[in-house]
Amino acid sequence: MNNSINELNQLKANAVKNLEATEGRRIVVGMATCGISAGAKLVLDTLKKQVAAAGLDNVQVMPTGCIGMCIYEPIVEVFEHDEEKVTYIHMDPDRVSRVVSEHLVKGKPVVEYTIGEDENGKLKSLNDLQFYKKQKRIVLQNCGLINPEDINDYIAVNGYQALAKSVTTMTPQDVINLMKASGLRGRGGAGFPTGLKWSFAAANEADQKYFICNADEGDPGAFMDRSVLEGDPHSVLEAMAIGGYAIGASKGFIYVRAEYPVAVERLKIAIKQAKDMGFIGKNIFGSGFDFDIEIRLGAGAFVCGEETALIASIEGKRGMSRNKPPFPANKGLWGKPTIINNVETLANIPKIILNGPEWFKSMGTEKSPGTKVFALGGKINNTGLVEVPMGITLREVIYDIGQDCLNGKQFKAVQTGGPSGGCLPQKYLDAPIDFDNLVAIGFMMGSGGMIVMDEDNCMVDIARFFLDFTVDESCGKCTPCREGTKRMLEILDKITQGNGTIEDLTILEDLAENIKNTSLCALGQTAPNPVLSTMKHFRDEYVAHVVDKRCPTGKCKALLSYFITDACTGCTACARKCPAKAITGTVKEQHHIDQDKCIKCGVCMDTCRFNAIIKK
Amino acid sequence: MQNDCGCNCDRANDERYAELKAYIDSVKGSEGITMTVLQEAQRIFGYLPLEVQKFISENIGVPIAELYGIATFYSQFAIKPRGKHHVGVCLGTACYVRGAQKVMDKVVEELGVGVGETTQDGLFTLDATRCLGCCGLAPVIMIDDTVYGKLDDVSVISAILNKYRE
Ligand SMILES: Cc1cc2nc3c(=O)[nH]c(=O)nc-3n(C[C@H](O)[C@H](O)[C@H](O)COP(=O)(O)O)c2cc1C
């Protein structure tokens, strides 16, 4: 079936009525992976059953993508035409029953399951929370609003209008010029200008070109792309078709990691629906442009997020990276010109085509226009997905949106850029976040994982953690990365075991510099970053480990010792529990730990009811 | 009974080979099918024993050495049989800073096996997984397709595992 633009507009008019719930109510359940793990599936099923049982014909119940605030999952939102939506949090089947009988049947919202009322007695919506106030949702606009499994919902929010506009009213060169004018830069980590990259591939003559969406999202602690795929899959498909048109590719691949089963399922549904409607396939909008999309699954290799390794993997080989040049835009998949863009980069594109480059440039900074989605996690109160304009400061993200460290602990560092990135200390909290600024202070934007660490996290241990990751994930092709990272890990192990020396720190730095300068691909070139940045900003912690043989946070077990203070009442509980019989003392008198016998298991500390046992 | 290949499996009567063959026939001729065929084979057989690799090699014309190379490169392919349930302890950064190591230690203690190993009774295989993307629930573990989150108190883990022992 081939749709014309008029037909698309007709579809839209109907779809809008549905989305705006002009008749009856529309209820959405946040069903991204995190919602599902918190129990959203059962909530959705129960809701559907009870709505049907109550005979409420004009209530539609459906899944939606990530609403953003993980700590409130499962979240249910009730939309009614011309009314403020009602947000229910921490839902379960019992709560569903009350919402159905009191709100849906009798029209009285169940206040105690919402996030409360404001001073005027009006129900608060999520948008009133600090968490959302500083956000600007462009990429995530539709996540948590539309049903990702229904193409009509996407059409209602201007879906496929940008593709129609591109292929029927613009030349491929017009599209590229518009992308260049917008200043959009790749969100996959490197920040390369998208329009410029497209122009390289467009300039190449070839019988076949390819357009690939990079949905490998391997950085630990990052789930931005997953949320876009789970909440708004059509926006990615639409952008791929636009990109294919611009560069002259008729075939697209989405390379998605297999750890994201929900995203894969929704993509499959979306591709099928788009094909049925004729938005993907032959002669799109009667323009003569053909574009097909296929999904390829990763198999658990972080390096496959790197573009040349990703290409090797789609070709069915071991996912090993290769030297650049030639760049994929010249010689990519099966030797043909290929463009690879990240999911979040793509999700911006339909909106830029429809609203124009000036609109896009009105957000963010001059060199980094637009927004960036961050996955805020770690030791922070409000974990979740946040989208903010570029140029916002870390302080705003961590304190205003994230609402401080957990349990009132002291902030120590925030890790950005995953295993290629670094740990930013307190003093950079007021640095504006954009591509160039972060590079200028020696960090990188990375793909958007933002993990907060507090006073209890040992920075040497964190560096060791990342090295452990890269050693595991190195593809093994080049020696500096394969062997060098291993040697670095050995040294870090030695330090966290209490056997390090001050010379080890120098060796570590030398090795790091060598690996950076000589590795084949960016995996190795950036692997030492977590070590270098922690050594630079938290050197005292390294020194404490190697000189004083002490871990200031008590995280490195081999380095800590337990002591009993004079708060001890002599209750003997710890002595009885100690598996090594290392605690001695008489009843009602302060006890003592024999450091030679102590195996540092921590049982005594967990047992003591008087906080009389400390570790240092 | 011995096959041409010298092993004792029964290709002719094992429906799983027919299922795999049907899949191969459906994709044959497209480019870059090696990975997808291995993925399908792993789904059907649960792992990729040498015999299955040989079968694939004969049917898609890719040398077995190359298949083995691919199967051992990607962490999701297994060449040894796995337990009935797959226990994945997330060691992503967000989980790690919130105590995933304690969770891992507890699971290791409970199961009595190390990472990558299968329990004697064949019930569980333990893995350290990459980030599962449920950072809001950190620290998490995933058993088969179910995620268990907020495991700050590791003492609940033994009850979770016991559910699978029944
Ligand atoms: C080790 C490594 C892992 C990467 N992982 C990803 C990833 O998971 N997702 C992604 O979009 N880009 C990843 N990249 C960046 C890609 O190579 C590439 O730059 C990006 O997909 C280009 O898209 P963009 O221009 O839209 O950002 C990775 C790079 C390296 C070196």
Image (spheres, rainbow, N blue to C red):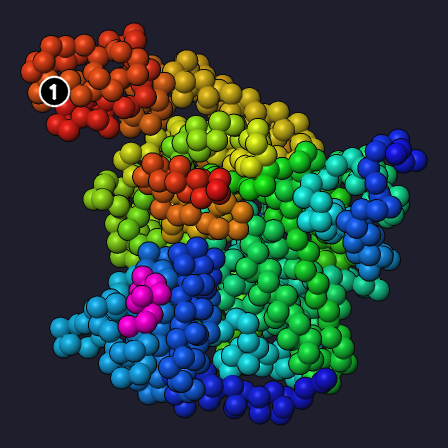
Q: Using the image, name the chain to which the residue with label 1 belongs.
A: A
| Location of residue B47 in the rendering, given as x and y in whole percent from the top left corner | 69, 41
Q: Is residue A445 above or below residue A281?
A: above
Q: Is residue A107 left or right of residue A367?
A: left
Ligand 1 within 8 Å of the CB at mark 1: no
**Front residue of B100 and A311:** B100
At numbered mark 1, what does the secondary structure look like: helix, strand or loop?
Answer: loop
At horizontal 57% and vertical 32% (from top left) the residue drawn is: B121
| Location of residue A500 in the rendering, given as x and y in whole percent from the top left corner | 42, 15
| Location of residue A551 in the rendering, given as x and y in whole percent from the top left corner | 31, 22
Q: Amino acid at mark 1?
A: Cys
Q: Is residue A405 left or right of residue A333?
A: left
Residue A96 lies in the magenta-colored region: yes
Q: Which residues are magenta?
A: A89-98
Task: Look at the image and tell me in which quarter the C terminus of chain A lies.
Answer: top left
Q: Report the magenta stretch's main SS.
A: helix
Q: Quadrant of residue A26?
A: bottom left
Q: Is residue A509 above or below residue A15?
A: above
What residue did someone put label 1 on? Answer: A571
Q: Is residue A56 above or below residue A178?
A: below
**Front residue of B47 and A470:** B47
At horizontal 84% and vertical 46% (from top left) the residue drawn is: B13
Residue A56 lies in the magenta-colored region: no
The answer, for residue A428, to whether it is visible in the render is no
Q: Is residue A284 left or right of residue A126?
A: right
At horizontal 67% and vertical 44% (from top left) the residue drawn is: B46
Mark 1 neighbour class, 10 Å CA radius: few under 14, some 14 to 19, many 20 or more: some
For this orientation, the residue located farthest to the right is B4
Q: Is residue A196 above or below residue A481?
A: below
